[in-house]
Image: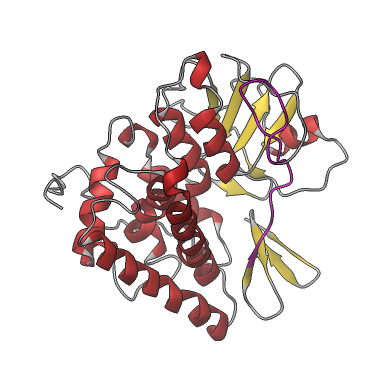
Amino acid sequence: MGQLVDGRWRTESGFASGDGDFKRAHATFRSWVTPDGRAGPSGESGFAAEPGRYHLYVGYACPWAHRTLIYRALKGLEPLIDVSVVHWHMGESGWTFEADEEGIVGDRLSKRAFLHQVYTDAAPDATTRVTIPILWDKRQGAIVSNESADIIRMFDSAFDQVGATPGDHYPPEQRDAIDAWNTRVYDTLNNGVYRAGFATTQAAYEAAVTPLFDTLDALEAHLSTSRFLTGDAPLEADWRLLPTLLRFDAVYHGHFKCNRRKLAEYPALTGYTRELYQWPGIAGTCRFDHAVRHYYTSHESVNPTRIVPIGPPLTFDRPHGRESV
């Protein structure tokens, strides 16, 4: 949930501007874990890759946090980086560590009650949006990064010498193609669903939802003849796309009014999504119940009744049948 400040509706990750368009806030902590602790592309040095040193704060509802859970699984980092999970509901005080009936949430590191306390512990005077994911350094008591795009690249490369599973999901020879897909998918789809859902004018909504479906159409055409976006194995562009696709029919189609078509009406995209979901370790990073309950109960401006629709059953466990693509 957000609040109305200076005439702009502020959500957990952005605000609606004067023209009704959703503007996403930028991450404010941008240091990098590197193999030897040298500075990365941004931020400060001093964050060397070491088993057990770092802690990840996530929520199963959030697609940006989901990226980091996917990479933690792909790279076999579960024994090296432990995790705390926020409650699926975000109320007036933001994300909380309130326990639920399954006992899977809570701040396992410092037993905080609210996520905003993680930020104030790291930088008491900072003014920043309280978002997930957060990569926390236990040794320094500091936030390394709250930018998911950076965190997944750290996970992909920094820990290879201290026990990570081998594999490069951003290989040099594929980077131009990966970057091109990343840019289009982020602008029109990953963030596009939010621009459509949080738009406060018809014009802003249509300006977001039209290119969103143009991108889904382009993805369908590409994946009709190619198994993955940039090669013969899933790479960074595929894994950045997946969290949005997994939530599309359950959340974005209805809650965010992205309803020209369902994902299920795109045969190639549906098969592709199933295959990635069934990739070793990935299904365990997904909690669709958290996602559905979060969106429909936390966004009062979009769904004031907070009624959670029962929805159709998701079918990502079915055979994907994409071996011949």
Residue 38 in the image: state x and y as whole percent. 71, 26
Question: Is residue 155 toward the left or the right of residue 181 in the image?
Answer: right
**Viewer-proximal residue among 36 and 68:** 36
Q: Is residue 12 magenta?
A: no
Q: Is residue 281 above or below residue 311?
A: above
The image quadrant of residue 226 is: bottom left
By what rule are the colours in the image chosen?
A: secondary structure
Asked whether residue 205 is in view, the answer is: yes
Left or right of 14? Residue 325 is left
Please provide percent x and percent y for residue 19. Answer: 67, 81
Q: Which residues are magenta?
A: 23-41
Quadrant of the snapshot with the N terminus? bottom right
Q: Is residue 115 above or below residue 266?
A: above
Residue sitting at x 25%, y 52%: 272
Residue name at image x 38 percent, y 75 percent: 214
Residue furthest to the right in view is 125
In the figure, 16 relative to 164: above or below?
below
Could you tell me what secondary structure mostly forms the magenta stretch?
loop
